[in-house]
Amino acid sequence: MTRLGTMTRQPGSSAQETSPGAGPGCSFRNVRERLQDSGLRPTRQRMALGWLLFGKGDRHVTAEALYEEARGAKTLLSLATVYNTLRQFSEAGLLREIAVYGSRIWYDTNTGPHFHFYVEDRDQLLDVPDDLMAVLKMPTAPNGMEIIGADVIVRVKAAPQA
C-alpha cells in the first residue's frame, strides 16, 4: 500500500488514474471537489471515506462494511465517525440512504432514480437494470401532493438446486 496525503491507497492506483467519465471511480482531487461543491469541508476523515466510497464507482455499502474497509486500508476512524460522515454525505446529496429491513441502512453512491434487488442469503444490494423496471407504472400522487421518489426493493435468494 502507498500513501497519498493521509489516505491509504491500493497498489497501482494514482490520483490521475481516474476522473469523471474516464472510468468507474473518481480521483482524489475529484473527491475533494465533490465535497466542496456539496458544501462540506474536505476534512481528513471525509476525504478518507469519500475516496473509499467514490473511488470505486457506483456501489452499495453499510456503515459497518465501510468501517471494516477503512480499517483494512489502515485509515484510523471510529465507527461513530463513519456513521456521522455517511449521514452528512446523505444530507449533502452525495449518497442515497436505503432502508432494507429494520434499522439497517445501506448507502448508495448512485443517487439517481433506480431500484434494487436485495440478495438475502448474501446480504447484498444490487441495482435492478432499468429495462426490467420499465414496465412499472408509478401511481398518481394524492391531490395536493407530488411524488419525490420511490424506493423499490425486490428481495431475492439463491434458488434451490434441482
Image (cartoon, helix red, strand yellow):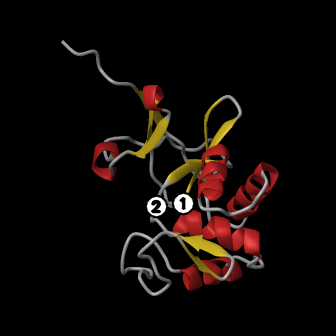
- Report whether residue 89 is seen: yes
- Residue type for callout 2: Asp
Looking at the rendering, in which quadrant would you find the C terminus?
top left
Q: Nearer the viewer, residue 67 or 41?
A: 67
User: Can you say whether 122 is above or below 28 in the image?
Assistant: above
Q: Position of residue 1 (x, y in %)?
A: 52, 70
Tag of residue 109: 1
Q: Quadrant of residue 31?
A: bottom right
* The furthest residue to the top: 162
Residue pictured at 47% horizontal, 27% vertical: 120
Q: Picture coordinates of residue 68 (x, y %)?
A: 63, 49
The residue sitting at the front extreme is 1
How far apart marks 1 and 2 lie (CA) works out to 5 Å
Q: CB of mark 1 within 8 Å of CB of mark 2?
A: yes
> Looking at the image, can residue 97 be seen?
no
Q: Say what secondary structure mark 2 lies in.
A: loop
Q: Residues within 10 Å of mark 2 (few under 14, many from 20)?
A: some
Q: Nearer the viewer, residue 103 or 135?
A: 103
In the rendered structure, the answer to whether residue 51 lies left or right of residue 133 reads right
Which label is found at residue 44? none
Q: Residue at x 44, y 80 (%)?
A: 20
Kind of residue at badge 1? Thr
The count of marks equals: 2
Which residue is rendered at x = 81% and y = 51% of the image? 80
Location of mark 2 (residue): 58
Q: Residue at x 68, y 49 (%)?
A: 144
- Element type at marker 1? loop
